[in-house]
């Protein structure tokens, strides 16, 4: 865990409301694991006051990447940063996805909705290095939500796209696409990230197919360090239901431990 | 070399900067980022006797220059604290202070008494001012008499020096401070958070699961500073000031207003290195102003 | 067309947006910028019986998201007001409200009585909550009994509807609101400013000539909103909400929390067009949310 | 009086800590008189909260100019604005310098220290149009404080420079230079703006020479409209000493009405 107060942005890319920043932060990059996240200070002033949690989208040598959608003032300010600017980053925070030795030779589904693809790119890359085969599912409302399309297509991985309006890939929900695929193939695991409703439905599907899965959850965060207890959510752990800290006890949790907000 | 130490009488801090309760976890969460022995002291998260579930989320909401929280003191309870956390904290070369909570007077006493039986604590901070627990009801720090009773009761059972933490949600904070002093408190710390509400307009629901919460951060600094100034002129015991301290300048302002030491809360979230940076800033400032002892400035406001 | 009007019972405002006392001069200062008849109402600067010198400068200090002022109610007194200002204000098609001040109970009564003998006022706002005048002392709004007495006395001498303006510097603002209601006040407005201190570090002097001042602006919004919510659940008379309202969204939040109308203060400095822009924003919002009457949302917070 | 929320910056210039912005604000420019000022919103957020008062440095058709020194956060933010950006301006505020018909054919001293020259450029230009002769006195601590040197020298006016360190012009205080000149010539009036101590000394000099003068005063301002009574200062008016509003009753006051802070 490091606070790099002067991490330098080396590259920026954007697609509509989606942005990708590449940032030089060698200490953080060295420790980063897929599913972990950063706490980024978006303003040097007091508005917004708190850092913003963003998944580590990729690591390349001393550099890390973040991929995010502008959803409010904090992400808007971040989106305005240009290459050469410094940002104050804390990380890597939390516990990431479980990459198990037995994944070797197996297919692993990585299912992301919109900005939810952020942590999955990193996990897919790591899966490859351990000899597993990532299968990407990438859903959005419309083509412009599939901001990472080209980047993903360049990897050579199998990618399944869906859009609600059919403007690209399968017309419908990404969960339907996963469900269909599960009729034909037997992945060893599923990693998911995206809107709550999407993940809840995915969890159901996984349970029906006895497919073990992990999801990366979100919550408003104070510290990102496990110190403030502001980010909690009800989690089933060892039979008990408790408020656990998303930042420290997560953000990645096994599907069976999560209580979905619809529950 | 400037002498940064802060002598509270019952306790000598190596410097006046203390990490504030509830914003610094059980202390160890910041250990990966810097050596905690740099701190003047640290106050751990509020402790009830038993483990507590805390309030329903969302528990945080941002406001202009501020943060509202309604954690509701989720925590592990004194037993787990003394077994699992305190032994590790005791190894640090800094003053470890426990934040004592209670549903009612007797619980405060039980927590204080339990903690006093263990090694490693430099003082207790009596949290009679948390706005996040009693729905609609008052906390003891909103009433001089309740403050007096609670302090008195805790002093009966615990030999540890006591810092009574005051609530800003009162008409006259000096009356409460005087009550704490009179009951034997060795110091007062102020302020805890201001009771606040944030609303999500589209859903027409409160932003916090608990409806109300406590406001902290830069927004409250001028209010906290006023209260520290008022209290420091009335009591003889040392005053520990807090509320929106984000920089060494903020810390100095509280000291000039009369605080012998300061606590840093919300700033730890925004800048996890806030405490060591403030300590460094105080040192440089004192040096550049030719002070031998930083404590010379305490209460030096020219009015 | 959405119905924006706000029916306070004793007074029907064309819309719920009122310019707050002390931030809008005697009303006419903003006339060059827009037609004041657009406003729901306007409250003039606090009036004592005699002209007043006010506090020594500096009178303003900025804080994070806030402003501290210690104007000390410099002003022309009721006579000059009624002769020179009121006749001009009376020509506007908006509710003109006078802010009534006093050193003690009898002065409040004299001011109210004098004002009531003149044409053109829609109501009086009783300013028993100004933190800027009594050095160290309390203002009536910090005590339910003093509030009751002052309101009662003013009601005896003035037939005008009375809005009692409450202080946030209290332990329990609902008790003061209930006292005002009980004494016959037709409405309450809240909040006035929060007692605050700002320090200039290098000179170690207070930034304000009067040492303490009152904090207003976005910083206090979550505190004011909480108080409006608490009071609106306790009293039966209408509540006018204010404190850090800068946008139509802020205004809506106060209404959702229970305010029948709102006042806009410090925002007038930052954006002199704040009031008309908020009115426009309310209209557009109500329209886009399919409301017939904006007042439907008053007190609609889901808790 | 207008609030132009979208006045466009058309040109910027800078010299160290001094900045000049040219801004298109036709309504304000049409009404502006020398010595009046603008209330400029420097941040769209809440820090700093208040507008900043800045003198009208010049008017040219639909454009106005401001000239300022960075002294804190507000002026720093303003200094970062670039051509093309919009700013929210309120003005023209207050009452300016008295330009009397009898100035015609006379010399008028315009004495400014550092950023205090801001309102004097405009007044000097207007003096010329009424047939008076502006004589500029421009003092600074060192050469770099004489930011407007080239601009002034291009006007053809008589300019007397001074610097404390002698790096340009007379070595010493601008007040000494004025004093000396007053031994030789008889201007009809003096307009002054600058640090309090400089103006106080100037006022003394004027009194000794029976030279009528006006000074532009500063104060922290809330509204700039005369509404908040936050900007007051003690002023002698008709025998009485009263708190008058710098923004509305000033910012320009006759020398004899001003109580200097040293008094
Ligand atoms: C561990 C973690 C990893 C994340 N990774 C990414 C990522 O890689 N890419 C990405 O685009 N986003 C990610 N997010 C979400 C991102 O943090 C929020 O979108 C961002 O904080 C919103 O800030 P804002 O100031 O732009 O919006 P705000 O104005 O603060 O909020 C806009 C809306 O989003 C809600 N919101 C704010 N913060 C959060 C939050 N932390 N969780 C859920 N809702 C929130 C608010 O209540 C509001 O409705 C992640 C969140 C977490 C907790
Ligand atoms: C009518 C008027 C016209 C002015 N014209 C010009 C001009 O043309 N060019 C120019 O460079 N400056 C001018 N000023 C001064 C300018 O307004 C201040 O320098 C500016 O507001 C400081 O803001 P800041 O945020 O940069 O500094 P801050 O951080 O707000 O303050 C820096 C320091 O300046 C003091 N200060 C702040 N505001 C004022 C003020 N209004 N008057 C006196 N001291 C203040 C503060 O107390 C502090 O010590 C004028 C002031 C007035 C009242
Ligand atoms: C998330 C959070 C949790 C807190 N928990 C406690 C607590 O357990 N005990 C306590 O006495 N104060 C608690 N506080 C109050 C702080 O210690 C401090 O009094 C307050 O936040 C004001 O200081 P600040 O503005 O520097 O944060 C908490 C504050 C925050 C923001
Ligand atoms: C400069 C200034 C002067 C004020 N004068 C008065 C006054 O004369 N009477 C009064 O009742 N309130 C006065 N107030 C308080 C405001 O009316 C209002 O209650 C307070 O500022 C909170 O609202 P705001 O945050 O919208 O400014 C004054 C406030 C300011 C900033
Ligand atoms: S964000 Fe502070 S504990 Fe999780
Ligand atoms: S700045 Fe408001 S009256 Fe002068």
Image: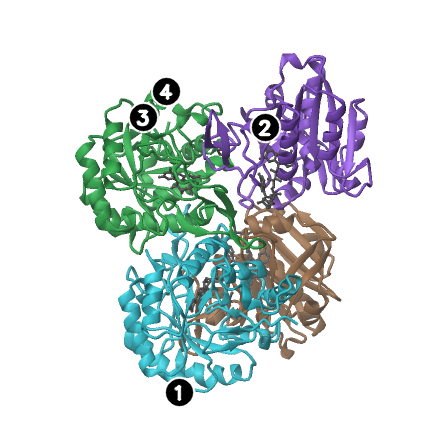
Chain colours: A brown, B cyan, C green, D purple
Q: Are marks 4 and 3 on the same chain?
A: yes
Mark toward the viewer: 4 or 3 = 3
Mark 1 or 2, closer to the camera: 2
Residue depicted at 77% across the width and 36% down the height = D162
Q: CA distance from mark 3 to mark 2?
A: 32 Å
Asked whether D87 or A68 is in front, the reply is D87
Task: Give whichever of A160, D248 is nearer the camera.
Answer: D248
Determine the secondary structure under disc 4.
helix
Label 2: which residue?
D255
- Label 1 and label 2: CA atoms lie apart by 74 Å
User: What secondary structure is marked by label 2?
Assistant: helix
**Residue hosting label 3:** C79
Q: Are marks 1 and 2 in contact (CB under 8 Å)?
A: no
Q: Nearer the viewer, mark 3 or mark 1?
A: 3
Location of residue A216 in the rendering, given as x and y in whole percent from the top left corner: 55, 65
Viewed as shown, does residue B281 lie left or right of B145?
right
Q: CA distance from mark 3 to mark 1?
A: 71 Å
Residue C171 falls in image quadrant: bottom left
Residue designated by label 4: C88
Q: Calculate the distance from the C-alpha at mark 4 to the C-alpha at mark 3.
A: 14 Å
Q: Disc 4 vs disc 2: which is toward the camera?
A: 2
Towards the viewer: B271 or B126: B126
């Amino acid at each position: 865990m490091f606070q790099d107060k002067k991490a330098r942005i080396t590259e920026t890319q954007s697609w509509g409301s989606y942005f990708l920043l590449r940032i030089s932060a060698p200490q953080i990059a060295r420790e980063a694991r897929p599913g972990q996240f950063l706490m980024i200070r978006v303003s040097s002033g007091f508005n917004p006051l708190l850092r913003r949690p963003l998944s580590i989208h990729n690591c390349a040598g001393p550099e890390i990447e973040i991929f995010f959608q502008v959803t409010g003032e904090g992400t808007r300010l971040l989106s305005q940063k240009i290459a050469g600017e410094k940002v104050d980053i804390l990380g890597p925070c939390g516990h990431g996805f479980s990459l198990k030795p037995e994944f070797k030779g197996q297919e692993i589904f990585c299912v992301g909705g919109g900005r939810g693809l952020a942590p999955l790119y990193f996990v897919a890359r790591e899966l490859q290095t351990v000899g597993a085969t990532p299968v990407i599912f990438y859903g959005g409302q419309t083509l412009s939500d599939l901001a990472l399309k080209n980047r993903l297509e360049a990897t050579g991985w199998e990618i399944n796209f869906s859009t609600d309006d059919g403007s690209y890939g399968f017309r419908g929900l990404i969960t339907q696409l996963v469900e269909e695929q599960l009729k034909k193939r037997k992945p060893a695991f599923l990693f998911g990230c995206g809107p709550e409703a999407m993940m809840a439905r995915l969890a159901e599907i996984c349970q029906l197919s006895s497919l073990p899965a992990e999801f990366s959850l979100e919550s408003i965060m104070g510290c990102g360090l496990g110190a403030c207890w502001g980010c909690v959510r009800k989690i089933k752990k060892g039979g008990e239901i408790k408020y656990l800290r998303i930042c420290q006890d997560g953000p990645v949790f096994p599907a069976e431990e999560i209580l979905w907000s619809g529950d | 070399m400037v002498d940064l130490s802060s002598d509270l009488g019952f306790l000598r801090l190596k410097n006046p900067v203390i990490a504030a309760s509830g914003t610094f976890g059980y202390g160890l969460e910041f250990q990966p980022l810097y050596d905690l022995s740099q701190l003047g002291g640290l106050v751990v998260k509020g402790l009830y006797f038993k483990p507590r579930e805390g309030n329903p989320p969302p528990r945080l909401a941002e406001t202009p220059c501020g943060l509202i929280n309604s954690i509701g003191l989720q925590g592990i309870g004194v037993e787990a604290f003394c077994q699992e956390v305190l032994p590790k904290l005791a190894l640090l070369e800094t003053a470890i202070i426990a934040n004592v909570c209670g549903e009612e007077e007797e619980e405060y006493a039980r927590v204080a008494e339990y903690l006093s039986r263990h090694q490693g604590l430099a003082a207790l901070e009596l949290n009679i001012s948390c706005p996040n627990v009693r729905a609609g009801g008052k906390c003891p720090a909103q009433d001089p008499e309740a403050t007096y009773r609670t302090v008195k009761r805790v002093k009966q059972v615990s030999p540890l020096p006591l810092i009574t933490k005051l609530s800003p949600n009162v008409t006259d904070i000096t009356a409460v401070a005087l009550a704490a002093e009179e009951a034997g408190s060795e110091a007062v710390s102020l302020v805890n958070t201001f009771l606040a509400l944030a609303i999500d307009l589209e859903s027409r629901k409160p932003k916090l699961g608990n409806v109300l919460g406590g406001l902290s951060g830069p927004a409250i600094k001028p209010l906290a500073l006023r209260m520290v100034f008022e209290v420091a002129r009335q009591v003889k015991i040392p005053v520990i000031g807090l509320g929106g301290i984000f920089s060494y300048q903020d810390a100095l302002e509280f000291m000039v207003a009369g605080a012998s030491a300061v606590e840093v809360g919300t700033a730890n979230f925004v800048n996890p290195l806030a405490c060591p940076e403030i300590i460094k800033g105080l040192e440089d400032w004192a040096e550049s102003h030719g002070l031998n002892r930083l404590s010379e400035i305490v209460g030096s406001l020219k009015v």
